[in-house]
Image (cartoon, rainbow, N blue to C red):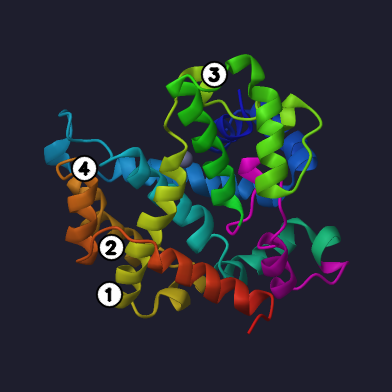
Amino acid sequence: MNKQARCTILVVDDDQGHRNMLRTLLKDWGYEYLERVARHESGHALYEMGFPPELRASCLADGASMAVHESQSRFWENVIGRSAPFWEGLYPRLTEFFPEQLLLRRVTAGDFYRAVNEVKPSLIRVDADEVSYSLHIILRFELEKQLISGTLDPEKLPGVWREYTREYLGLESETDADGVLQDIHWSMGSFGYFPSYALGNLYGLQITRKLRQDIPGLDSLVAAGQFKPLHEWLAENVYRWGCRLEPSDLIVKITGENLHPRDFLEYIENKYAALYDIR
Ligand SMILES: [Zn+2]
């Protein structure tokens, strides 16, 4: 079972054994990782739970596509959960649970926000920051195209993975656990799934632009921990369609435009220019 699947079970199960395991995982992987995974998988769950009653018990109660599904998970994981208002609001509560790590070391909410958004190439996709994340997807997409077309011998995959990692991320993977074996997707037959994450980023940020137009006080609501208006907006504009519309039609229905990368690129540029003081 991979990191994400294990954490999903932990956040929904109240069993004492799982609580003990959660303590161990907190020690091994850190709070921010677990919190981020919980937000991601909860984003998927909110989408699935938000399909309207009239679609229930039909094949229309499903995501428009896995890319749209990933837009919902990555929205909560990153757009909301790695935002300054989110941590401003949550941070006082967090310091109650981790006083030694945060208060005694004089870590401020601003320090924490910067730490969870540190841009640093990583060998592991699920640990990647928002800026370098899509490079992990492009790497996998390039390799799976070659595997499917038969131009890449699967036995050579571990070595080719290392070459691409060097080229795309500037890093050396020392073991296959840090390389070709790190994801569950190919081993369970999910070839062609990885682009859903990068497309999800595009869908998510395009939807966010419309969301911000409709709810101008979004940041204040998030800082106050008031997520109901946001959730209601997603239910009304995204969840209620289930898979009645093709993804290309759904994004036009929600935002009035075909899918494009501009909102995602603008989000990355604005957020990280501010964080890294780049003019
Ligand atoms: Zn996901």
For mark 3, what is the residue? Answer: 187
Residue drawn 66% across the image and 67% down it: 91
Q: Is mark 3 within 8 Å of ligand 1?
A: no
Q: Mark 1 Cα within 10 Å, few/some/many (few <14, many 20+)?
A: few
Mark closer to the chain start, 1 or 2: 1
Q: Position of residue 107 (x, y in %)?
A: 80, 70
Say what secondary structure mark 1 lies in: helix
Depth check, mark 4 against mark 2: the one in front is: 4
Residue type, mark 4 in image: Gly
Residue 85, visible in the rendered structure: no
Depth check, mark 2 against mark 3: the one in front is: 3
Q: Mark 2 Cα within 10 Å, few/some/many (few <14, many 20+)?
A: some
Q: Position of residue 259 (x, y in %)?
A: 29, 58
In the rendered image, residue 124 lying in the magenta stretch gets the answer yes
Q: Quadrant of residue 124?
A: top right
In the rendered image, residue 6 lying in the magenta stretch gets the answer no
- Asked if the residues shown at circle 4 and circle 3 are in contact, with their CB atoms under 8 angstroms apart, the answer is no
Residue type, mark 3 in image: Ser
For mark 2, what is the residue? Answer: 233
Residue drawn 74% across the image and 38% down it: 23
Depth check, mark 4 against mark 3: the one in front is: 3
Residue 151, visible in the rendered structure: yes
Mark closer to the chain start, 2 or 3: 3
Mark closer to the chain start, 4 or 3: 3
Q: Mark 3 Cα within 10 Å, few/some/many (few <14, many 20+)?
A: few
For the residues marked 1 and 2, what is the alpha-carbon distance in whole angstroms? 9 Å
Q: Which mark is residue 242?
A: 4
Mark closer to the chain start, 1 or 3: 3
Residue type, mark 1 in image: Asp
